[in-house]
Image (tube, rainbow, N blue to C red):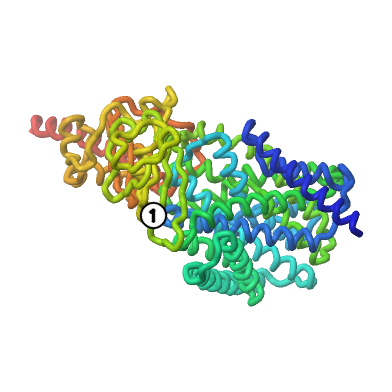
Amino acid sequence: MEHAIYLVTLVGTALVVAAAFSSLIAFRFGAPLLLLFLCIGLASGTDGLGIQFDNARIAYFAGSLALAVILFDSGFGTPLNALRQAAGPALSLATVGVLVTTGLFGAAAHYLLDLTWLESFLLGAAVASTDAAAVFFLLRAGEINLRERVRSTLEVESGTNDPIAIFLTITLVEIIAAHANPEANVLLTSLAFGFLLNMGLGAVVGALGGLAIVRLVDRLNLDHGLLPIFVLTLSLMIFAAAGAIGGSGFLAVYIAGLIAGNSDIRAVTILKRFQDGMSWLAQIIMFLILGLFATPSQFPAIMVPAAALGLFLMFVARPIAVWLCLIPFRLPRPEVAFVSWVGLRGAVSILLAITPLLGGLENGRIIFNTAFIIVLVSLVIQGWTVGPLARRLGLIVPARLGPLDKVELELPGSAHHELLAYRVAHGSPVARGERIPRWARPSLVLRDGRSMRFQDMGRLAAGDQVYIFVPDRYPRLLDKLFASRAVVDPEDADFFGAFAVDPARSAAELEAAYAPGLTEAEQKLTVGALVTARLGGHAEYADRVLLGPIELIVRDVDDKGKIMGLGLSFEPTAPVARVPVFLSAGEIGDRLSAFIRNWRKPTETQLAEARADEKPAAEKAATES
């Protein structure tokens, strides 16, 4: 018995270490990290090293706990401004998008696999949710600076679509296991009522739980080493409590993390570091267990239809669902195309595919193997093309800041101030003599191993380490002061235009100088308000607006989305790759208007020609008379 404990511990830790080392390979070559985790699990399983693991209940239980940890960390790290910015598109994708994807994919699965309609929709529900962990790892590994609106949409969608896919999957499993064959209207009514109840209870428990976490952390004087464990345990209690009363535990834990992460919770720096580490560990464990549970020798029997379904999901079901969901929002076609392509499938899809096995369904193993192959196809094809596609669609923007060396230090007993340690970088504004704002209070400077008061140091030099007290939620201004200049790619040298434009200037001056064809109402606006209006009411860093012979580029925005800097270019950028199938509502309206105008023009032309013909005839008649 003792020997078995040592052996299991040795094998388990060796797998985790191997997965951790594989991250070095992924960061080096930009490979999908989660694909490596899965492959390690597959190589160690029944058809590999021979580790026997076929307990579906343990796999599902461990995967569910790991997913709860990941969702809490996802909510904890999602800022409210990102939620506000992308709430509409992301929630539409997380609700309607999941349903549409499930329906389209289920119809295709019914004809490609020997499954009933309900089993086909069950498979569709299992693979309907996206895996943001794989997406954002690839963005970080490839050093891709993606547009903030696109990034926020993908983050919020990934955090909110899992609970809906889980509800659909579990409900369909229960219906099939009970050998029920309800009519379509009865099934839809049951799903709608159950969905509202499940999500409603989950949201309420999550909100109350998040507030309770903040209150308990602030009131209990726990040791800093115990505090992160306390918060993690509370998050799992919220997950379990919501599920126990019939709510969505996954939605509850995400909302709890969202509320806790955006509050003035004590020791937020320590909590973020701990949550980040636990999230990595949870991903590694979940993918290793799911890889061990799979049996690759069973894949060849369904490889062709499963791969075809994976391609159908990537090229048909997901794009159609994204297009339908984003029609009400005036998003550019390249952004819609990128969101549709970045719907990577991952651990959640494999985890949900275990539920048919737990329910004892006859075709449970076929559903699991098919979902596993679809995830592999998605990670291989989409995982390696995220970066190139983002560049192809023109969604990469130059970095705002260069290298920044900063450490956030927690102040004992203080919830309203932070202590930041900055190392002065070469070429940074403070190294060039820029003053530190008055609301920031430098207290100590380390130079060449000596510590001195800030007042006695004189001008800061590169390499100095400065300790500064700042209010909580400090502005980004300090980061800009201590960061070195961003290294701009030669292709991006003119990205923001050759000239600066004051956003507070009148738009009438633009009309007088460049005649871009502004209306009288637009000329009464400021340049910043004009750009914001042309962008649909919200501007973000690196947005561009074409005005006749010139192009205005957003150089900077404040925390509230107000334009603080604009650039002007006389050479508008070449249009990015066109994606004709992804038309927004605004573009559809513009095309309909253009079609109506073009349709009316021939009629007006014919009337003008008729009048021209009538005029000589009338003149001739008058002459004869």
Toward the viewer: 456 or 304? 456
Rendered position, 260 above or below 396: below
For this view, does 53 lie left or right of residue 345? Answer: right
Rendered position, 167 above or below 411: below
Q: Residue at point 70% right, 49% down?
A: 284
How far across and down, in percent of the image, does residue 199 sit? 57, 69
Q: Is residue 244 shown to the viewer in this render? A: yes
User: Mark 1 belongs to which amino acid?
Assistant: Arg
Element on which disc 1 rests: loop
Q: Is residue 188 shown to the viewer in this render? A: no
User: In which quadrant is the N terminus drawn?
Assistant: bottom right
For this view, does 331 lie left or right of residue 304? Answer: left
How far across and down, in percent of the image, does residue 475 sit? 35, 49
Dot 1 corresponds to which residue? 473
Q: Residue at point 65% right, 70% down?
A: 240
Q: Counting other residues with Cα less than 10 Å from the Cα at mark 1, is it few (<14), some (14-19), or many (20 or more)? A: few
